[in-house]
Amino acid sequence: MKEAFIRELKRKTLSFMHNAQYLVGRRRMEAVFDGYDASTIENPPLKGTKTIAFVITRMVRFHGGQTSILRLGTRLVQKGMKVLYLIYKPQSVSEMKLCAKANLPGYEGSFAAFDSFVSGIGRKYVMPDIVVASSWDTVSYVKKLDTYRMYFVQDYEPYFYRFGEEFLMSRSTYGQGLHMVSLGAWNKMMIEKEASPVSPVDEISFPYEAREYPIKERDFDSYKDKKKITIAVYVKYYGKRLPNLIPYILGNTARELAKKGITLDVRYFGEAGTYRIPGGKNLGQLTHDELAGLYSEADFGMVASMSNISLVPYEMHATGLPLIEFREGTYPFFFPEDTALLASINDRDISGMLLQAINDPAGIKEMNEKARAHMQGLSWERTGDEFYEIIHKAYDAGRA
């Protein structure tokens, strides 16, 4: 009797959890469908290059993608353009500015609610020459504005989802007629390979901000005598950052190194401080100065760039922090061989890799020098200038 009761209780509990997950998923999709437009447009000729507006969901603190938009917009302001950031979800302008300042102190450009911008009675702003989608869910909103429409592609977003509705919906945006500009060459390759876009994809260099992350001289010869190895690990809850696999690998690594009398000090960052991660300390979301301090204190950095590479590997390399990446990800697409320690998602631990590295200080130094040499000339100024040139090529084509 008791066993039957327990079985029934388990069944009802699982049923409740399943229904709750279904309702959460359905409500999330209903929010996506609000304003959804899967049509293919015919872009009008670009008639001017004075004003540009980037459409985002809402401004969030410590958001790498939105920081990139702010950096790009700031450079376009410096090139003489008027830049607006349009938020389509409810958010006050004061909160937008506060979050933007946390992402990029000294950013340039203005904020406005998307609804106040849509043409019709009571419109507060003059239609910009260019409006830019910043993620797949903003494409439908960009298409509501009757002007030249672009699409700043920062990642191959179908890979954010399991195969299904959002995978297919996000992939379809690459074929809806917007003028696409890829941050780095990998997105462009993936779109042309898997999405069959109806229009060409331009690309701009993947940049980093060297002035915020200066080089720190490191005594690599001292690594072989270390009894504690500190690793700064970039973590996010979504799967492309391997949020479960990395703690598993590093937990095993810590146990193997302990047999050699070495302590592994794992310091996670990038996710909210409330995010629980086993086997290490979660430092939470850090400011630029805090990141620079962490990179300076750590012996190695670790990032899982499984889709488009992020700014973090560049920042770590800039400070001279030896990097651990994954060979199955996109790091080898952006950097040459022997610029990082390449782990595999099949590794149970990486203790052997670390022990070999700390006993080869010359190898670590050479690895770092190759990485830094590869990054020479990269900057947000250069990337912003490339975007600006793409705009003017489209303008010239529209006048032809």
Image (spheres, helix red, strand yellow):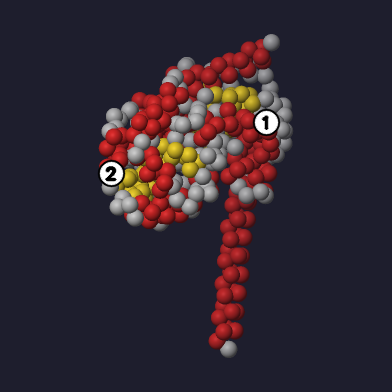
The residue carrying mark 2 is: 226
Marker disc for residue 86 = none
| Residue type highlighted by circle 2 | Lys
Q: Position of residue 348 (x, y in %)?
A: 48, 52
Q: Secondary structure at mark 2?
A: loop
The x, y position of residue 119, in whole percent, is 61, 31
**Identity of the residue drawn at 34% across and 40% down:** 358
33 above or below 191? below
> How many marks on residues?
2
Mark 2, Cα crowd under 10 Å, few <14 / some 14-19 / many 20+, is some
Residue 109 appears in the picture as rendered: no
**Residue nearest the viewer, comparing 367 with 28:** 367
Q: Disc 2 or 1, which lies upstream in sequence?
A: 1
Residue 207 in view in this figure: yes
In the image, is 254 to the left or to the right of 394?
left
Q: Quadrant of residue 101?
A: top left
Residue nearest the viewer, comparing 328 with 212: 328
Q: Which residue: 67% across, 19% down?
A: 45
Residue 157: image x %, image y %? 59, 40
In the picture, which quadrant includes the N terminus?
A: bottom right
Q: How far apart, in angstroms, are the residues tagged by discs 2 and 1?
A: 47 Å
Q: Tell me residue 329's x, y (percent).
A: 54, 39
Q: Closer to the observer: label 2 or label 1?
A: 2
| Amino acid type at mark 1 | Glu
| Residue located at (48% from left, 36% from top) | 310
User: Under tag 1, what secondary structure?
Assistant: helix
Residue behind mark 1: 192
